Image (spheres, rainbow, N blue to C red):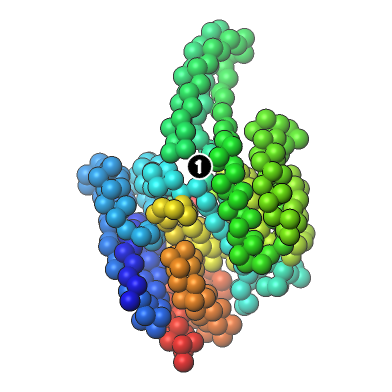
Amino acid sequence: MPKYKIALLPGDGVGPDVVAEGVKVLDTVSEIRNFIIEWRKFDFGAEHYLKTGETLTEENLKEIEKNDAIYFGAIGDPRVKPGILEQGILLKVRFYFDEYVNLRPVRLFENVPCPLKDKNPRDINFTVVRENTEDFYVGIGGRAKKGKTKGELEILRELYSVKFNLDIESDADEIAYQIGVISRKGADRIIKYAFELAKRKKLNLVSSVDKANVITDVYGFWRERFSGMAKNYPGIQTEFCYVDAINMDLIRRPERYQVIVTPNMFGDIITDLGAILQGGMGMAGSGNINPNGVSMFEPVHGSAPDIAGKGIANPMAQILAGAMMLEELGEEKGAKVVVNAVEEVLKEGRFRTRDIGGSSRTKDVGDAIAKKVYEIKQ
Ligand code: NAI
Ligand code: MG
């Protein structure tokens, strides 16, 4: 019987509540599909930080690395300065394991409210493949006052390291600047992932997002790499979209999109739009994937302090992230069962949390989905 070791990081706020439901559903699937999940719980997050002053150490990362995947809830706490936990835990994991694919399926299920008039589940079903390690999110930049300033900026990545030595001469009273980096290998691997995904799912359109008309160097390069990669997939249609135009189009005619591949920053923006198209934060699951390494699966939402501890968070985003994890582990059938169970529970309409128009509690939605998993088996 296949056995998967999963690092479990419930985190803060609603994280532990929704993770409990995710574990419940995945354990149920493992029973009916004959595999074993061995959960290894880690208590990283706000409490741990407030107690010890530590977020995640190198040693912790090595311990996490012994697992096949990471199932993550959410982090963030009003008592901790913004950024500390995000950078110290979430971004650290993404970079350490070089999880270069941020995969975000956007699918509207039946009976889930969508803010678009006249659009239904058939119209909203696409996947955003967001680059997760480069672009303007490499985190290098600085400030300079009038006169001469030196700047030393460095990026260290699994793929490469780059150093910028800047000699700045400015007559502005003060400037701030930020450097964006896209590498050939970094672009190629994410674009290839998008095409392979389209091929695997028998989809025939891959849309590339950029702003190559203004930010010509960084996104011009992205465009060049996309065109090059597209040649290897003659059966798949391609198009270039400017980020401003695709934002409009995702509202006007979401039905035409299948796979969207995008540099990091635009992907961040587009996927929040995607989340609301599918019914909000409670419905959006995601994967931070390294196809040859340790991947992390999590809901798109944060720790939701406004509803934490009330038992009313929607566990579906977390559960759908669990389905993505099963797919990545090679348990495609199990993944389908989870998605179908969520779909059925929504269709029946008896168990829905407040964010999607119901009044059920987190635990009851999780129970209903787990029960549905059993029923689907029969
Ligand atoms: P958030 O995603 O936690 O909440 C935004 C809104 O969505 C809130 O009104 C919340 O009640 C609602 N919401 C979120 N998840 C929900 C669920 N499962 N069911 C029903 N409603 C849900 O974002 P916010 O408020 O900006 O951030 C809160 C904390 O989370 C901050 O500390 C932030 O830094 C952190 N954060 C962490 C992320 C992560 O761990 N991946 C991602 C985003 C934010
Ligand atoms: Mg975001």
- Number of residues whose C-alpha sits closer than 10 Å to that of mark 1, classed few (under 14), some (14–19) or many (20 or more): many
Q: Which residue is mark 1?
A: 133
- Residue 157 occupies which quadrant of the picture? top left
Residue sticking out furthest to the left:
52
* Image point (27%, 43%), residue name: 57
Question: Is 165 placed above or below 375 here?
Answer: above
Question: Is 91 placed above or below 339 here?
Answer: above
Question: Is 296 placed above or below 312 here?
Answer: above
| Amino acid type shown at disc 1 | Thr
357 and 60: which one is in front? 60
Question: Is 33 placed above or below 238 here?
Answer: below
- Residue 83 occupies which quadrant of the picture? top left
Question: Residue 285's x, y, as percent?
Answer: 51, 62
23 and 291: which one is in front? 291
* Image point (38%, 66%), residue name: 19
* Image point (60%, 60%), residue name: 197
**Left or right, residue 36 beside residue 118:** left
**Left or right, residue 247 beside residue 279:** right
Residue 361 in view in this figure: no
227 and 317: which one is in front? 227
Dot 1 falls on a residue whose secondary structure is loop
* Image point (46%, 76%), residue name: 334
Residue 351 in view in this figure: yes
Question: Residue 186's x, y, as percent?
Answer: 55, 41
**Quadrant for the N terminus in the image:** bottom left
Question: Residue 7's x, y, as percent?
Answer: 32, 60
**Left or right, residue 226 beside residue 338:** right
Question: Residue 158's x, y, as percent?
Answer: 43, 39
- Residue 312 occupies which quadrant of the picture? bottom left
